[in-house]
Each structure stands twice: as C-alpha cells, then as structure tokens.
Image: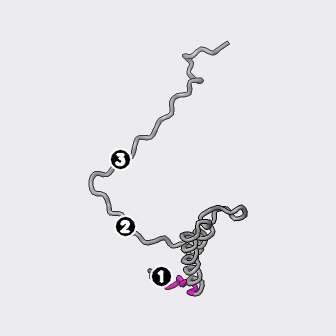
Amino acid sequence: MHDLDPTRRTPDPRLERLLRQTLLVSTLVVLAVPMARGDSVWFGPLPLWLLGMPLVSWWALHRFRLPRTQPMPLRSGRRRRGAAQARRRPDARKDPRLSRAA
C-alpha cells in the first residue's frame, strides 16, 4: 500500500488508529440513531461532521494520496487530427461599401 519512496514517512499509528475508531463509531451512530442523520441548528448537517470530516482527516493524514489505479490502455487506430482554427471575420465597420448613418 505504501509508496516505494523511502523519503516518505508513514503517519503516526496512534492517530491513524484514533481516526479509524472514530469512523467506526460514527458510522454506527449514523446508521443506528435516526437523529444523527439530520441537521443541527448549530452544526448543520450531522453526517458531515460525524463521517465526512473524519474521512477527510484520515485522507489528509496520508498526505492526500489518491488510490492507485490501472493505467489507461493506449488506443489503437488512427490518430485524430486537430480541428482547423477559427478565423476572424473582417470588421464590418471598416468596410467602405457600407454607408454611414447620418
């Protein structure tokens, strides 16, 4: 799971364990207690604070690493040419054929 770069440090295991436990307990609270799925006058949406913020904190603890995905396969076939660039029209105000309004 960890990158092969030796200069990167692993997160503090105590903090990671605390965040995992917080996520587990808050997930159980949101699932078991209907009021935890509602809104608070002071705090706003409670699932945001019970689930969203600990998840973002856990993600930030791992230095915002994105999950690894498989590389996209290269497309075979013809290469698409770029579209022609649009050209500007001549300015109608500079056209001597148009008469000027009086």
- Foreground mark, 3 or 2? 2
Q: In percent of the image, x 36 and y 63: which residue is there?
A: 72
**Residue named by callout 1:** 5
Q: In percent of the image, x 54 and y 70: which residue is there?
A: 31
Marks 3/2: CA distance? 24 Å
The reply to whether discs 1 and 2 touch (Cβ–Cβ < 8 Å) is no
- Foreground mark, 3 or 1? 1
Q: Which mark is residue 71?
A: 2
Say above or below: 29 vs 86. Answer: below
**Residue named by callout 3:** 81
The quarter of the rendered structure image containing the N terminus is bottom left
Q: Quadrant of residue 42?
A: bottom right
| Whether residue 59 can be seen here | no
The reply to whether discs 3 and 1 touch (Cβ–Cβ < 8 Å) is no
**Residue type, label 3:** Arg
> Residue 3: x, y in percent?
46, 80
Q: Is residue 4 left or right of residue 102?
A: left
Q: Secondary structure at mark 3?
A: loop
The quarter of the rendered structure image containing the C terminus is top right
**Residue type, label 1:** Asp
Label 3: how many residues lie within 10 Å, few (<14), some (14-19) or many (20+)?
few
Give the dominant element type of the magenta stretch: helix, strand or loop: loop
Marks 3/1: CA distance? 39 Å
The part of the chain drawn in magenta is: 4-13
Q: Which mark is residue 60?
A: none
> Residue 8: x, y in percent?
53, 82
* Total numbered circles: 3
> Residue 74: x, y in percent?
32, 61
**Residue type, label 2:** Pro
